[in-house]
Amino acid sequence: MSPNTNIIISYISVLVVASYVAYATDPNQLQDFCVGVNNPIDGLFVNGLFCKNPMEVTVDDFLFQGLNIPGNTDNQVGSNVTRVTAENLPGLNTLGISLARIDVAPYGVNTPHHHPRATEVLTVLEGTFYAGFVTSNQPNGNNKLFSKILYKGDVFIFPQGLIHFETNIGRTPAVALSPFSSQNLGVVTTAAATFGASPPIPVDVLSRAFQLSPVIVRNLQSRRFQ
């Protein structure tokens, strides 16, 4: 057997092993955690939703109506997100996708947040957005902001798990449509998770982390974030 033949056989073997490992990996989680139990009587939940009997499925299980209706942006941040997930569109269950309509009033903001289980594809339908995301720590210890002014028809990507935001910098309402790469993307709003956790994160921890006085931290913890 020639040396070249041995190389080819070795290469194919590596590909076969790699393929096996890829198919043997666990599926992505669809919730923050799923604590194991030895006895189903203790409680039974699935990573996602239970499946409906196929014989009882109807066409309405694959239909959601109302995404054409603007969300109410009359709130402290001037934005509203209407989500279409497996919770309100059952036919999405197990398909690994979901959708959201984002309405932002003039100079309003969809505040910094991240989706632990999904990449977001923001598509501007109306208005002008300033949007961006922050990378995780760089080799030099910095966090880099990738941001852009977006106009009607523009598409922008928010990679999975990274903090991002959108703000309407125009004088008219702005609307965007965002598909997600998970049926249950998860939403962690930065301010609400940090200062609105229950029970609260200790004041000393937040004071040191954000270089704020304890008085300011307590004031922030008393507020209701969206």
Image: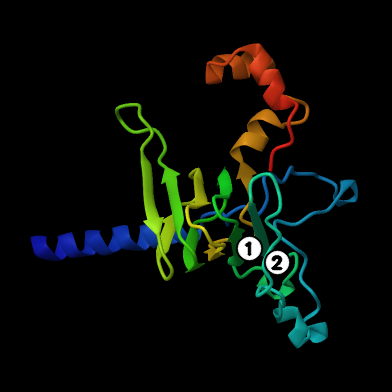
**65 above or below 24?**
below
The kind of residue tagged 2 is: Ala
The answer to whether residue 14 is left or right of residue 62 is left
Residue under numbered circle 2: 86
66 or 73, nearer to the observer: 73
The answer to whether any part of residue 201 appears in the image is: no
Tell me what residue is drawn at x 62 percent, y 42 percent: 189
Disc 1: which residue: 183
Q: 1 or 33, which lies in front? A: 33
Q: Where residue 133 sits in the image (x, y, percent)?
A: 44, 46
In the depicted view, which residue is nearer to us: 147 or 47? 147
The residue that appears at 54% across and 62% down in the rendered structure is 172
Q: Residue at point 60% right, 15% down?
A: 207
Position of 129 compared to 38: left or right? left
**SS class of the residue under badge 1?**
loop
Q: Where does the C terminus fall, quadrant-wise?
A: top right
Query: In x, y percent, where is residue 58?
Result: 78, 86
Q: Measure the alpha-carbon separation of dots 1 and 2.
A: 6 Å
In the current view of this chain or complex, which residue is farthest to the front?
171
From the top left corner, tell me how far across and down residue 128 is, in percent.
45, 60
Q: Position of residue 88 (x, y in %)?
A: 75, 68
